[in-house]
Image: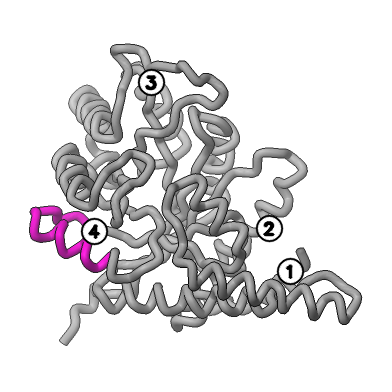
Amino acid sequence: MSSPLCQGPLISFELMPPRHPDRAPKFWGTVDRLMKFRPDFVSVTYGAGGKDADTSHEVITKLVQHTPVQPIAHFTCVGSSRETINEELSNYLKTGVRTFLALRGDPPVGIPNWHPEPNSLQSAVELVTTLREIEDEACKASPAAALRSAFKPLTIAVATFANGNPAAGTSVDDEVNRLLVKQAAGANFAITQLFWDPEVYASFVEKCRRAGVRIPIVPGILPPVESRRLHRTAELTGITAPQHLINRLEEAEELDRAEAERNGGKPNEFGHAYAAGINFGEGLATSVLNAGAPGLHLYTFNRAEPSLDLLKKIGITGLDGTDDEKKEAA
C-alpha cells in the first residue's frame, strides 16, 4: 500500500521577466494561465551579469504578494562580494522568498576583458556555502530568525547538466562530482539544464546515486514547438537538439506556411509544428517520469500553452482542473 503522503510528480515552470514595459501585460497574462494550474513552484530568471535583476525582483515580489504559488529566485554570484550577497539575500527575505536557485551566473555583457574582483564569489558552490553561513549567523543572532527558519527553512536549488556542460567543458562525471560538492555545501535539490534523450537523464541520475548524491534531481524540459527556439537554445547553451527533431519541426512548419498561403492568412502557431513538438515532449516527459523523475521543471520562455498542453497530454492537470482554457490570440 502506498503512503498517503505520496503524491503525484512535482510540476514547476520557469519564467523570464519582461525586458520592456510594453510586454508586461502579455507576460502577466501568461503568469495568470500558469497560476491556474497551481504548480508547486515557479522560478524567475534574469539576464547575464545581473541584467534585468530589478525587474526580476519586482516580478518575484508580486508573485509572493498576489499568488498562492511559491516563487524561486534565481540568485547569481559571479563578481559579487559577500556583502553584496548579504544585501541581496536580505532584500529577498523581506519579500517573503525562502527558496533560491543558486547559480554562478555569466559575466557582464559587453565587457570582453572583465575579471571578477579577487575577493568576490567565483562559483555556485561558494554561493550555496555563503547563503547557508548568512542564514546560520542570522539564526544565532535572533531567536525570531531561528524560529522562522525552523518553520520555513531556507531552501537552495542548484543547476546541473545531465549530459555535461559544453560551455564550461565539463563531462558527465565532472557534473556528478560538482553536484556532490554542491550537496555537501547545502543544496537541497537540483534542476537539470534541458536535454533531448530520456536516457541521458536516467543514466545521469544513476551515476549520481552511485556516487552518493542523495538530493532530488528534477529534469528540466523545453517543449520543442518551434525550430527557431531550438537553434537559439543551442547557441545559448551548446546543447543541440537531435537532427530528426529539427527536421520534423521544419517540415511541419513548411506545411503550416503552405496552408496559410492557400488560406490567405498567417501560419497557425498551434498547427502541425506545434503538434509535432508536443508529441515529442510527451514522449520525453513520460520516459523520465517512468525512469523515476520526481517531477518536471518546464522551460516556458513565457508561453503558457506548450507547457500546459504537454502536461495535459501526459495526464497531469491543475489542482482546479482548469487545464484547457483555450489559447488566447497571439
Tell me where residue 316 appears, x and y as whole percent: 45, 78
Query: Marks 4 and 1: in contact by CB < 8 Å?
Result: no
The residues colored magenta run 201-216
Disc 4 target residue: 216
Element type at marker 1?
A: loop
Query: Are the residues flagged by discs 2 and 1 in contact, CB closer than 8 Å?
Result: yes
Q: Which of marks 2 and 3 is nearer the N terminus?
A: 2
Residue picked out by circle 3: 80
Front position in the image: 102 or 71: 102
Q: Residue at x 42, y 47 (%)?
A: 72
Name the quarter where the C terminus is drawn: bottom right
Q: Is residue 48 left or right of residue 123?
A: right
| SS at mark 4 in the image | loop
Q: Which amino acid does label 2 sit on?
A: Gly
Q: Name the residue under label 1.
A: 328
Q: Where is residue 289 in the image (x, y as percent from the top left)?
A: 32, 74
- In the picture, measured across the screen, residue 199 lies left or right of residue 183, that is right
* Amino acid type for the residue under numbered disc 3: Ser
| Front residue of this view, candidates 159 and 93 | 159
Figure disc tally: 4
- Mark 2 near mark 3, Cβ–Cβ under 8 Å? no
The residues bearing labels 2 and 4 have C-alpha atoms spaced at a distance of 31 Å
* Residue at image mark 2: 29
For residue 37, above or below residue 84:
below
Measured Cα–Cα span from mark 3 to mark 4: 28 Å
Q: Residue furthest bottom?
A: 1
Direction from residue 173 to residue 13 in the image, left or right? right
Q: In terms of sequence position, does the residue under pointer 2 or pointer 4 come before the other? A: 2
- Rate crowding at label 4 as few (under 14), some (14 to 19) or many (20 or more) other CA atoms within 10 Å: some
